[in-house]
């Protein structure tokens, strides 16, 4: 660096990517004196410091390490962030933190002897706090959606759910189980003395300059409490329909569907199939100053700007059905009901759609046609359902094949037969199978996308609803009219080289 650089503030790009090796350098001292080492070579130590004229700090470093210190001006906020990044808990390996925590003298008591004060004391120890923080940081870096803390007879397991699949990580010793569980419960403001009943809580943490919400659930098991932390990172929420996996031909039809002034639109699929993300993206698409949008959710996962979101609370009587009746009196244009679970909610939803509102909701059914029969089974009158239902979107999530290590292959005949693909359909096509590399942690997959099945409710489908036709009959009519089934949409993403046959077959039923 030249004289001019020394007088100006350092750029972020001028800070090192790795910590400078200096024995016994105190992080506390660096933070108090607001400096961070930049480079050590030939007995010359370059540092970034908020006050380059701080003679005491410079002399202390020269005496401690027998070097000449050359200071450069750095912005205090940049220096503090780099100290944390290079020398804080973020730089320590999980193994090191576990080792430090395990060396601390935690007196393990039996379940009957452990009391709240003892648990709180253990959970407040610095090594336990660092250990839990590191487990959370690792999960976020790996794009995990959930962290599972699972107690077993002779071990304590920690697993991350990444791209919908659970992965084991380095687990702390069994003797730290109570301290770790208590620390997580304290973070969520749960009762740490109550270990016989399930509890639910939330917390917010500021990590890497962004605020991340966590939903925490505990449940008692035979060998202690099992805890799951759901990571709700607003930055991972995809609100772009194409990024979610919508093909162009479906986007055009879906845009027309959600532009309707009133009626009911259902999104179906099992838990974890991306229904909430699709609905949030849809609401963001149609959100405007002209529309009042109210949602009723259990739970509210992400906060959406300009949208009134309500958390249901059955314990105090705020149910989906009751809340929906109240929402209608708030003069909304668009309503989202998190899930239709019972006859009362189904009937109230249909009535809301009949009275001039555009209503979105979800159902747990295997395909789009199944949503129709489920609503009828719940007791909704067929003439009301056929009058209000505009369309049903069924979806699943499939893992994206890692582009860095995918390799071409010839699929076995049984996979092609299961997919309903004839051998001549793959002539000239290159299909891929997962490999495994550092970029995807050896899994062969990185990220996920959705596959869809869109059932448009037209006059023919309405006739089938009024006739109380079964799922297969409704599906047959829809396919004849151009509906692309889930598995066929998945096949298209296989042809595009984005996912694999195995992934599509795993998430779709036999057709």
Image: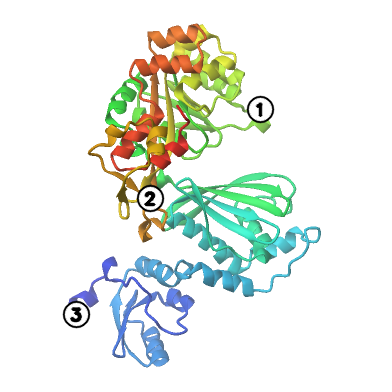
Rendering quarter of residue 16: bottom left
Residue 288 appears in the rendering: no
Give the spatial CA distance, label 2 vs label 1.
Answer: 42 Å
Q: In the image, residue 50 lies at what x, y percent?
A: 34, 74
Q: Percent position (x, y) of residue 125?
A: 63, 68
The C terminus lies in which quarter of the figure?
Answer: top left
Q: Position of residue 414 (x, y in %)?
A: 41, 37
Residue at 32% across, 31% down: 422
Q: Dot 1 lies on which element?
A: loop
Mark 1 = which residue?
A: 317
Q: Is residue 368 visible?
A: yes
Q: Nearer the viewer, mark 3 or mark 2?
A: 2
Identify the image quadrant of residue 274: top left
Residue 386 versus residue 1: which sits nearer the camera? 386
Any mark on residue 328, and which?
none
Tell me if mark 1 has few (under 14), some (14-19) or many (20+) residues whose alpha carbon lies within 10 angstroms of its own. Answer: few
Q: Could you say where residue 318 lies in the image, as x and y percent from the top left? A: 62, 28
Mark 2, residue position: 446
The residue tagged 3 is 3
Residue 327 shown left or right of residue 306 in the figure: right
**Foreground: 462 or 189?**
462
* Label 2 vs 1, first from the N-terminus: 1
Up the image or down, 293 lies above or below 157; here it is above
Q: Residue at x 59, y 22 (%)?
A: 321
């Amino acid at each position: 660096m030249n004289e001019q650089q020394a007088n100006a503030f350092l750029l972020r790009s001028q800070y090192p990517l790795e910590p400078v090796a200096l024995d016994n350098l105190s992080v506390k001292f660096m933070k108090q004196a607001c400096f961070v080492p930049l480079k050590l070579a030939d007995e010359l130590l370059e540092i970034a410091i908020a006050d380059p004229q701080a003679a005491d700090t410079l002399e202390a470093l020269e005496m401690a390490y027998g070097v000449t210190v050359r200071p450069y001006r750095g912005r205090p906020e940049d220096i503090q962030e780099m100290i944390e990044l290079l020398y804080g808990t973020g730089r320590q390996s999980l193994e090191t933190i576990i080792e430090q925590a395990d060396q601390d003298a935690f007196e393990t008591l039996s379940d009957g002897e452990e009391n709240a004060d003892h648990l709180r004391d253990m959970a407040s120890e610095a090594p336990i706090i660092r250990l839990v923080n590191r487990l959370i940081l690792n999960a976020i870096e790996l794009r995990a959606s959930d962290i599972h803390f699972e107690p077993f007879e002779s071990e304590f397991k920690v697993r991350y759910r990444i791209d919908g699949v659970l992965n084991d990580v380095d687990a702390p010793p069994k003797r730290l189980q109570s301290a770790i569980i208590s620390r997580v419960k304290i973070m969520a403001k749960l009762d740490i003395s109550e270990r016989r009943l399930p509890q639910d809580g939330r917390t917010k943490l500021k990590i890497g300059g962004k605020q991340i919400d966590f939903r925490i659930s505990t449940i008692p098991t035979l060998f202690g409490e099992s805890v799951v932390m759901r990571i709700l990172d607003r930055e991972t929420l995809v609100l772009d329909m194409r990024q979610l996996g919508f093909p162009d031909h479906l986007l055009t039809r879906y845009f027309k569907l959600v532009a309707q002034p009133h009626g009911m639109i259902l999104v179906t699929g099992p838990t974890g199939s991306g229904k909430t993300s699709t609905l949030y993206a849809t609401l963001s698409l149609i959100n405007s100053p002209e529309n009042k949008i109210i949602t009723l959710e259990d739970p509210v996962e992400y906060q959406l700007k300009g949208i009134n979101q309500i958390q249901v609370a059955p314990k105090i009587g705020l149910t989906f059905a009751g809340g929906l009746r109240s929402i209608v009196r708030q003069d909304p244009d668009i309503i989202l009901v998190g899930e239709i679970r019972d006859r009362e909610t189904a009937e109230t939803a249909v009535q809301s759609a009949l009275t001039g509102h555009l209503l979105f909701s979800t159902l747990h059914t295997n395909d789009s046609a199944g949503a129709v029969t489920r609503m009828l089974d719940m007791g909704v009158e067929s003439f009301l359902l056929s009058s209000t239902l505009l369309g049903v979107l069924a979806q699943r999530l499939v893992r994206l094949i890692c582009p860095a290590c995918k390799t071409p292959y010839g699929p076995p005949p049984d996979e092609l037969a299961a997919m309903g693909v004839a051998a001549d359909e793959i002539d000239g096509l290159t299909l891929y199978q997962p490999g495994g590399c550092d970029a995807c942690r050896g899994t062969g997959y990185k990220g996920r996308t959705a596959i869809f099945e869109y059932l448009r409710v037209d006059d023919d489908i309405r006739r089938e609803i009024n006739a109380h036709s079964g799922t297969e009959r409704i599906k047959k009519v829809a396919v004849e009219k151009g509906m692309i089934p889930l598995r066929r949409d998945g096949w298209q993403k296989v042809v595009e080289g984005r996912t694999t046959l195995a992934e599509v077959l795993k998430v779709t039923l036999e057709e």
